[in-house]
Amino acid sequence: MHLTDQDLSNPSVWQKAGIRLPEYDRAAMIRQTKQTPAWVHFGAGNIFRAFPASLQQKLLEQGKAHTGIIVAEGYDYEIVERAYRPHDNLSLLVTLKADGSIGKTVIGSIAESLKADSADKTDFPRLREIFRAPGLQMASFTITEKGYSLTRGDGGTAPDVERDFAQGPAKPKSYMGKIVSLVYERYAHGASPLALVSLDNCSHNGTKLRNAVLAFAEQWVKNGLTDSGFLRYLKDPAKISFPWSMIDKITPRPDAGVKAMLEQAGFEDTGILVTHKNTYVAPFVNSEQAQYLVIEDHFPNGRPPLDQAGAIFTDRGTVDKVEKMKVCTCLNPLHTALAVFGCLLGYKKISDEMKDADLVRLVKGIGYREGLPVVVDPGILSPKAFLDEVLQVRIPNPFMPDTPQRIATDTSQKLPIRFGETIKAYLADGSLQIGRLKLIPLVLAGWCRYLLGIDDGGTAFPVSPDPMYPTLKKQLGDLRPGDAGPFHKVLQPILSNSAIFAVDLYQAGLGETVEKDFAELMAGKGAVRATLRRHLAES
């Protein structure tokens, strides 16, 4: 079995292998999408294929949609070239359920794949054509939080962004420059409405997208590269909206065990690719069963009825509560804690960490004792029930091949939301004492210890990619486990950096605590495990 339209024409073979095929006229869907595009998505990675694309497939099968999704990749073009086009934009979704059962479904809702590369003489003009289409309802994004950033790790403007600010929308190079160029195309050809919908796993994602888009427009208007009407168009909520959203579905890199299982079933397109930009991608995508998508219902040109496929549309305030519940308390902080200590303790799977009594006590303490007191119940989801599912079903799922090393990627970009917001909530609540936080400071100290790239047994390991790592590594210098303190001089520039923690930890009353915890973690071989146990016994 090969993942192509031609091979799908023999459904009995796929059914025998337990693989469900799309139940709609895919050729008609592709024709209709190309003629009247309604949804274009940027970010062709695994979460998109596992979740938004599968929701649209449900709508197509129910007859509630007749067009699919056009996907564009603006960072790693190899994904389109090697994982999409050779397989007619099909993918195989493998759902790894906690009870051990596995679902296998071919996702066919992607009608077209394009490279968002302004130098490409075919694909970028096609994207401009799509953005001119009056019926286009939404452009959505899964480009990671750093995709919206216009600055370097040191705070200066990124070179490609600076170039695009000066040269305008004709041939942009930066990711956001390309997006704003395409929206400008829409403005210049009728100014039809459009929703720009971030589906990235970051706080107030719609505002992050809006701020980046407006920054470009303001510079282009200032430099005389576009007229001022473009800025008014972007600021008019009846024309352009930037809804907030919360997305949640654990989707690790393609797993070798899943690859072997598929091969045994007779599926042959199982090659796991690592691109030159270190993206892990395959014709299949493996994911957990649980999934949540909550979106602010603000779509000035209409929207797909994704609520009929499982998404929840609501108001911005409710999205904010759900997002804070998940990102700041009930899932993401626990993942980061497991990532940091998992790397230090030599774990290779997140699920295996949930067999470690110390780590289980750590994440339960962070979630139930330190996090839940500041969660505002969003009403549409129960925080306690959500946290129970995370700790009892989702993270321990032995069939989910997620790794602490993957979760540790870009941690400096995640800490302000995953822990900083809880710290700020404690400071703002007169009934809560900041000194009640014991385990969150320990995780922050553990992250500083992790940055040394040496595990608890003294063995070096590669620190996961992080845009701030070069700066942080320089600050930590030649520090090694076993070195004696005091560590204030080394740690002070890091712990006082509110860009990393959302607060100055010293002003928040936690800087000295983190320093003390770090000193304990630095005591030598075995100090990480010993410090964990000591703090868990005291908390």
Image (cartoon, helix red, strand yellow):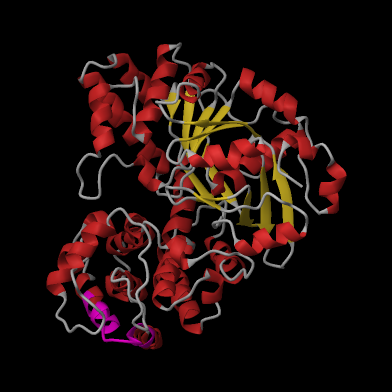
Instruction: Classify residue 33 by image quadrant.
Output: top right
Q: Can I make out residue 236 in this image?
A: no
The residue lying at 32 percent from left, 42 percent from top is: 149
Q: Quadrant of the C terminus?
A: bottom left
Coordinates of residue 245 in the picture (x, y in percent): 49, 43
* Vertical side of 172 occupied by 53: above or below: below
Between residues 466 and 420, which one lies in front from this camera angle?
466
**In the image, residue 465 lies in the stretch drawn in magenta:** no
Whether residue 240 is visible to the viewer of this picture, yes or no, is: yes
- Please provide percent x and percent y for residue 524: 28, 86
Residue 481 is situated, as x and y percent measured from the top left of the image, at: 26, 81
Q: Residue at x 21, y 70 (%)?
A: 511
Residue 523 lies within the magenta run: yes
Task: Work out whether residue 290 or residue 347 is closer to the camera in this orientation and state it.
Answer: 347
Asked where in the image residue 18 lies, by quadrant, the reply is: bottom right
Residue at figure coordinates x 60%, y 44% from the top left: 49
**Which residue occupies the foreground of this view, 194 or 45?**
45
The magenta segment is 515-530
x and y percent of residue 185 in the render?
A: 42, 17
Q: Main secondary structure of the magenta part?
A: helix
Is residue 195 rendered to the left or right of residue 447? right
